[in-house]
Amino acid sequence: MIQYFKNSGGQTIEIDKPENGIWVNILPPLKQEEFADLSETLDIPIDFLTDSLDIDERSRYETSENVKLIVLNTPTENNSFNESDAYYITIPICIILTHGQIVTVNSFENGAIKKFLNTFKNRNPDKKNMMVLKIFEKVVQNFMEFLKEANQKRNQLEQRLYQHGRNEDLHQLVRIQKSMVYFVTALRSNETLMAKLMRTSFLQLNEEEREFLEDLIVDNAQALEMANIYTNILASTMNAFSNILAGDRNSSLRWLTATGVVLSLPLLVAVLFCMKIPLPFGDSPATFFIVPLVCLAISGSACAFFIRNKYF
């Protein structure tokens, strides 16, 4: 789906066809025919439009035929039905600067572009550099929000683990840890991209735009630091609870082993007296009472031994 937006009288208006000074937003479902038509209409290399289809596309920039491409990674919820997958993943946003338009291509719907659309009425499409930086800003804000949401989930799961200690909650922590790996990797890649844009003349930033980009680099670094901290906390928490669960499992095995020994000893005595061989008190009527008493004594001694050694 292709959307065309322009500003008129302080309002965002969606139009039917491209013209100069507008924002072109491409959303799923993505059709190859639409890419081909748009590539021809706006004179954009087809590769620039299809790069967003690769979910593993790294953050980078390049130029071809005076058309500039910037690829930025942004977080999104993972809609996979596989219960072992990460809660959140990162996807690429392609920002294309043509001769007269700014084009964004998204392989999935994401919050950063929705936020940018809500503030587009305050933007000037002719100032393409600031448009790009504002998209960067929304991406960084999106990372912050997802990091806070993931941290809240982590806190809730930790509380449940303290109360119940279920493996199911530990598995969900693994899913959050996978999400943090995606976040850390994407934030580092975005940080490298912003630093290159600051050092080079790719966007030909003016002083105001450079200051704004510097602020974005600081905010991105803060998000990266948060992601690293949450990753370390998750690793420590999972190691601690894994050791606790392993200890509980060993305690259960010790208890079962000790219980088996306590139950097997009187059984051994009873089996001996059931054999058709001469045994002490074998012909005595008191044997009926002696055998249970001996079994109880042996079981009691075994219980006392295991209790003293903290098997129970």
Image (spheres, rainbow, N blue to C red):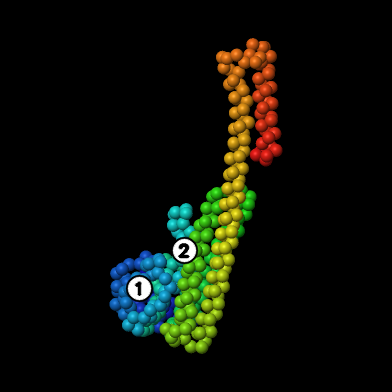
Residue at x 56%, y 70% (from the top left corner)? 225
The reply to whether residue 121 is in sight is no
- Residue lying at 66% horizontally and 14% vertically, measured from the top left: 281
Q: Is residue 239 visible?
A: yes
Q: Please tell me whether mark 2 or mark 1 is closer to you in this view.
A: 2
The image quarter in which residue 300 lies: top right
Where does the image place residue 147, in percent across and percent down from the top left?
A: 55, 66
Residue lying at 68% horizontally and 14% vertically, measured from the top left: 286
* Residue count near mark 2 (Cα–Cα under 10 Å), binned few <14, some 14–19, many ≥20: many
| Circle 1 residues within 10 Å: few <14, some 14–19, many ≥20 | many
The residue beneath circle 2 is: 89
Q: Residue at 48% of width from left, 65% of height from top?
A: 182
**Residue assigned mark 1:** 49
Mark 1: which amino acid? Leu
Q: Residue 176 versus residue 67: which sits nearer the camera?
A: 176
* Closer-to-camera residue (238/264): 264
